[in-house]
Image (cartoon, rainbow, N blue to C red):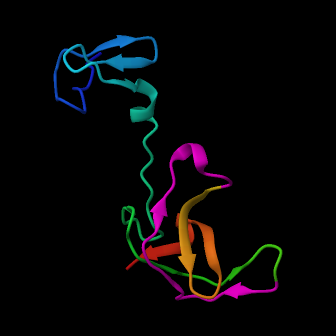
Amino acid sequence: MSLPPCPKCQSSYVYSDRSLLICPECAHEWDADAESAALEVRCANGNLLQDGDSVAVIKDLKIKGSSGVIKMGTKAKNIRVLDPEYVVDGHDIDCKLDGFGAMKLKSSVVKKL
C-alpha cells in the first residue's frame, strides 16, 4: 500500500499510526480515513460543484413545514458544499435563496450555472 505524500510539506516519508498518517519531517498529522471519505458533489447534469459556485433549481420544490414553493430557475449564488459528516438525508449543499433565506439542498435538484 502506497501512502500519499504529506499535504503540508510534500514529504514522501509518511508513516501510518493506526488511523493517523504522520510526517516525520514537519510533524504534520492527519486522518487517513478523511482522504478516502472525500465526497465529490455533482449537479443533476454531472458537473462537479465546488464552494462559491452558482446554481439554479431545476424543478419546483415544496418547503417542508411551510406553504411556500421554490420555483424552478431560482438561483443560489456562492454555495457551500458540505463535508460528508454534515450531510443529512442527502442535503449536501448549503446556500441562501432570495426570499427564503439559508437552506440546504440536494445536489440532484440543481444545475451549475
Up-down: is 52 above or below 97? Answer: above
Up-down: is 9 above or below 52? Answer: above
Residues in magenta, as a range: 67-89
**Which residue is drawn at the image coordinates 55% and 75% (left, top)?**
96
Residue 6 falls in image quadrant = top left
**Which residue is drawn at the image coordinates 60% and 67% (left, top)?**
105
Up-down: is 102 above or below 13? Answer: below
Up-down: is 20 above or below 80? Answer: above
**Magenta span contains residue 13:** no
Quarter of the N terminus within the rendering: top left
Percent of width and height locating residue 60:
65, 84
Quarter of the C terminus within the rendering: bottom left
Residue 32 falls in image quadrant = top left
User: Residue lying furthest front in this view?
Assistant: 26
The front one of 71 and 9 is 9
The front one of 76 and 37 is 76
Judged left or right of residue 22, residue 70 is right
Main SS of residues in magenta: loop
